Amino acid sequence: MTIRENIKNYKASAMPPKPPIVLTAQVACCENTSKDALWHIAKNVPELRKWVVANPVADAKMLEYISQQGGPGVKQSLDVLLEAYEYAKNGD
């Protein structure tokens, strides 16, 4: 390995790691949040599950899991989501 490569590798390894994501309602309902992060919230942060329900990226499997696990406000969030689906489908 050349000196230049060693310096480049040192600089890359000397950089501090990215800070951890602070889990908030905004993170839970943001469509740019990774599915891995959403699953982490669904499995480990019951008070934010209701916000994952509002995330357009949350798929049926994730919503089913959240429904089964429950948590503060989850039932109400799922009710609103299902009502919105019905409204969009039927137009009433």
Image: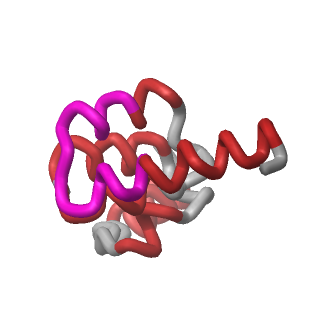
Q: Residue at x 78, y 37 (%)?
A: 89
Give the vertical position of 42 relative to 21 (above or below): above
Q: Residue at x 37, y 69 (%)?
A: 18
Q: Is residue 17 left or right of residue 5?
A: left
Q: Residue at x 50, y 49 (%)?
A: 34
Q: Residue at x 59, y 45 (%)?
A: 57
Give the vertical position of 59 relative to 57 (above or below): above
Residue 42 locus on image (x, y percent): 28, 45
Residue 76 locus on image (x, y percent): 36, 57
Q: How is the image coloured?
A: secondary structure
Main secondary structure type of the part rendered in magenta: helix
Residue 78 locus on image (x, y percent): 42, 48
Residue 12 locus on image (x, y percent): 44, 63
Q: Which residues are magenta?
A: 64-78
Q: Residue furthest front?
A: 92
Q: Residue 90: tell me if it is visible.
A: yes
